């Protein structure tokens, strides 16, 4: 590989390679009927990487795209119950697959994991999310970092604000300068998922990775009721004072556009923002920059699960697909296009965006990478936390202490 390729040129070379290799295969190829959530034209190139890699290995890829993070899960369950299980289905970071495992609907892929030494090349939080009762059921495909603080460099320069190193006092001091200059300090999205990402960013910044693990993994009441959680809640609510009036219900795309257009200075969003910056023609370190909240990475990933099959050929196709999805070459090409990072620690990321390199460095440091809170809470509890955050943000008279009590009740009783 030519190490001097720019990111854009490297991506173009990937797409060309994928197009040429996608025609390989034969009538005897092992099949894979895959349910995915990547539905847009912009997401097609990343799907092409996976299908081409599978074809090159002797497989035949067929996919159906269902919009929404829960769409593939619902479709998969319906197909299993109808006796027509797909070969693989896309799941996001959560406990959604637990019920399917407990009902005996998903196949474990321990043999693929062991043969390819995944435990040697993947960090523990990823391995934990893949497993149920010590057995491997999921394959990680895309790993994202949802706790990035993005900033418009030109806006900060215009108002004389310094890039904050934390999401504490220096962050709010910078926003005060932006506000005084008549611009929007913070581009706030009022959707449930984005408010959750925002709270998580404040939380990891306030309590650090050690207390994060104690809170979510051990449900340590001293942390849950401690000053760090209260501080995170206070900062979470305070940020509303720096947002424009149109935040309620606004999705992340038009919210990020406020930063891109120079109307706003800051936004908290996952690294999928990189693709939008690229599409808008913005350059890292020239037009925008990033800060990893808490100097740590909260894992937010897409996985594939494998419903049990009765046809041995389809089972063989599943195992081949599981292997191909996380091979280093597949992951480098796929992650470059998607804007994610590889789920394994041995991939060459030299052509990647600088923000992706920052998250990958944290990903490879056991002291700086933590599991997503959704992997430690049941789906109902996840919904309860989201509802609490929305109510807290939108209810002026609700205090941080009251929100913390609600938070503690949800987490400790889950």
Image (cartoon, rainbow, N blue to C red):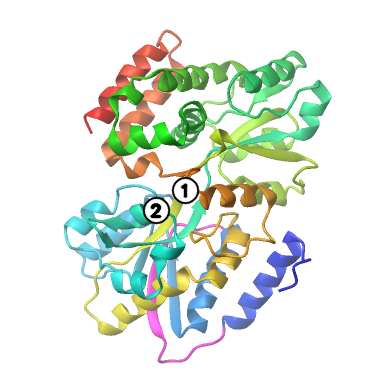
> Position of 40 compared to 101: left or right?
right
User: To which quarter of the image does residue 80 belong?
Assistant: bottom left
Above or below — where is 276 with respect to 219? below
Q: Is 304 covered by the magenta stretch?
A: no
Q: Which mark is residue 366?
A: 1
Mark 1 Cα shell of 10 Å, populated few (<14), some (14-19), many (≥20): few
Mark 2 Cα shell of 10 Å, populated few (<14), some (14-19), many (≥20): some
Q: CA distance from mark 1 to mark 2?
A: 8 Å
State if disc 2 and disc 1 touch (CB < 8 Å). yes
Read off the magenta span: 23-40
> Position of 292 compared to 396: left or right?
right
How many circles with numbers are drawn on the protein? 2
Above or below — where is 388 with respect to 258? above
The location of residue 193, given as percent across then percent down, is 45, 37
Per the image, the residue denoted by label 2 is 124
Residue at left 56%, top 54%?
340
């Amino acid at each position: 590989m030519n190490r001097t390729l720019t990111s854009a040129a490297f991506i173009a070379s990937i797409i060309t390679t994928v197009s040429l290799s996608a025609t390989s295969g034969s009538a005897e190829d092992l099949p894979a009927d895959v349910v995915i959530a990547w539905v847009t034209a912009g997401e097609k190139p990343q799907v092409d990487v996976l299908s081409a890699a599978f074809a090159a290995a002797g497989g035949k890829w067929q996919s159906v795209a269902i919009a929404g993070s829960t769409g593939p899960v619902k479709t998969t369950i319906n197909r299993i119950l109808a006796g027509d299980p797909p070969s693989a289905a896309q799941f996001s970071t959560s406990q959604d697959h637990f019920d399917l495992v407990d009902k005996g609907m998903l196949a474990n892929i321990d043999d693929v994991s062991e043969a390819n030494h995944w435990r040697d090349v993947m960090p523990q939080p990823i391995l934990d999310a893949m497993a149920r009762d010590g057995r491997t059921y999921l394959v990680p495909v895309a790993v994202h970092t949802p706790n990035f603080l993005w900033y418009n460099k030109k806006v900060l320069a215009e108002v004389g604000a310094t890039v904050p190193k934390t999401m504490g006092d220096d962050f709010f001091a910078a926003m005060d300068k932006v506000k005084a200059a008549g611009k929007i300090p913070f581009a706030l999205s009022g959707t449930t998922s984005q408010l959750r990402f925002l709270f998580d960013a404040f939380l990891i910044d306030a309590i650090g990775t050690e207390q994060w693990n104690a809170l979510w993994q051990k449900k340590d009441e001293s942390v849950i009721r401690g000053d760090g959680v209260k501080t995170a809640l206070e900062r979470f609510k305070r940020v509303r004072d720096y947002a424009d009036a149109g935040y309620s219900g606004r999705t992340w795309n038009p919210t990020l556009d406020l930063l891109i257009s120079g109307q706003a200075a800051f936004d908290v969003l996952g690294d999928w923002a990189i693709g939008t910056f690229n599409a808008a023609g913005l350059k890292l370190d020239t037009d925008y920059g990033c800060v990893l909240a808490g100097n740590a990475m909260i894992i937010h990933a897409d996985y594939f699960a494998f419903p049990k099959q009765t046809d041995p050929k389809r089972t063989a196709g599943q195992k081949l697909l599981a292997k191909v999805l996380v091979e280093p070459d597949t992951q480098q090409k796929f992650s470059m296009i998607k804007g994610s990072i590889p789920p394994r620690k041995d991939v060459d990321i030299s052509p990647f965006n600088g923000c992706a390199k920052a998250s990958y460095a944290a990903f490879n440091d056991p002291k700086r990478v933590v599991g997503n809170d959704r992997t430690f809470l049941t789906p109902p509890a996840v919904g309860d936390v989201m509802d609490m955050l929305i109510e807290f943000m939108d209810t002026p008279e609700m205090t941080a202490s009251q929100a913390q009590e609600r938070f503690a009740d949800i987490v400790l009783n889950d």
